Each structure stands twice: as structure tokens, then as C-alpha cells.
Image: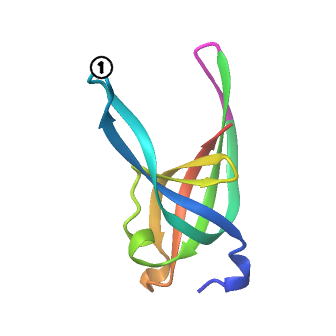
Amino acid sequence: MSNSGQLKKLVTLERAVITRGDAGSEVESWASLGKRWASIKTNSGAEKVEGQALESEITHRIRVRHDNETAALTTRDRITFYGREFDIKSTVNVREANRDIDILVTERV
């Protein structure tokens, strides 16, 4: 179990919501699932050329306490922190102990 003193970042858990716009087209927005205290650790960074633009991608591990909401996070969800957006790639119930969830994410910059 992680030391609660290490969970110092207040992050927001968000889920994509698809609605219909005025013209009938699908519009994606994000609904808050709540805030959680977390630790954020950088794993790696990479750059690639996409079209004619250079894109950077940074991977992180975000750890939060296990609860019903964090246990149900999927790759369709995301985490935000001070304007930064983290796309969820996978979640792991640490040691299957139902105490901590490690969330592997990517951040595009």
C-alpha cells in the first residue's frame, strides 16, 4: 500500500459523454466523476512526426486509492490535473489488494 502522504496531487477523473448537437452530429464532452488524491510519476517521453507536426507524448503512472469509481476506470476515461489531460491506457489493481490503483496514462504535449 502506498503511503497516503505520497498522494499529494488532486486530480479529476472524467468520463466521455456523447450527445447530439443542433445539426444532429455527435458532440463529445467530459463529465466529472470526482476528484481524488494521487501521485503522478513520469515513466518515459517520446517525440514523433505526425503529418507535418512534431508531437510529444509522455507516459506517466498515476496512483490513486481503490474505490468503486477508480476500480471502474477504462480507456474511455481520462484524468485532468491543472489543465493537463491524461488519456488512460490501462489500470492495475496493485497486488490485487483493493487498496491502490495504478493508472498508466499518456499525455500529449
- Disc 1 element: loop
Give coordinates of residue 7: x percent, y percent.
68, 75
Give the camera-side residue of 29 and 56: 29
Q: How many marks?
A: 1
Q: For the N terminus, give its image quadrant.
A: bottom right
Q: Residue at x 33, y 40 (%)?
A: 18
Residue located farthest toward the front when viewing the structure as drawn? 22
Quarter residue 96 falls in: bottom left
Q: Is residue 82 above or below residue 63?
A: above
The stretch of residues the image draws in magenta is 47-52
Quarter residue 41 falls in: bottom right
Q: For the C terminus, give its image quadrant.
A: top right
Give the camera-side residue of 100 and 17: 17
Q: Is residue 64 above or below residue 60?
A: below
Q: Residue at x 52, y 63 (%)?
A: 103
Q: Residue at x 37, y 32 (%)?
A: 27
Q: Is residue 48 magenta?
A: yes
Q: Is residue 38 left or right of residue 94?
A: right
Q: Is residue 65 left or right of residue 71?
A: right
Q: Mark 1 = which residue? A: 23
Residue located farthest toward the left when viewing the structure as drawn? 24
Q: Residue at x 41, y 70 (%)?
A: 69
Q: Amino acid at mark 1?
A: Ala
Give coordinates of residue 71: x percent, y percent.
40, 71
Q: Is residue 52 left or right of residue 100?
A: right
Mark 1, Cα crowd under 10 Å, few <14 / some 14-19 / many 20+, is few
Q: Is residue 44 magenta?
A: no
Give coordinates of residue 88: x percent, y percent.
49, 52
Main secondary structure found in the magenta portion: strand
Give coordinates of residue 87: x percent, y percent.
52, 48
Give the camera-side residue of 2 and 34: 34
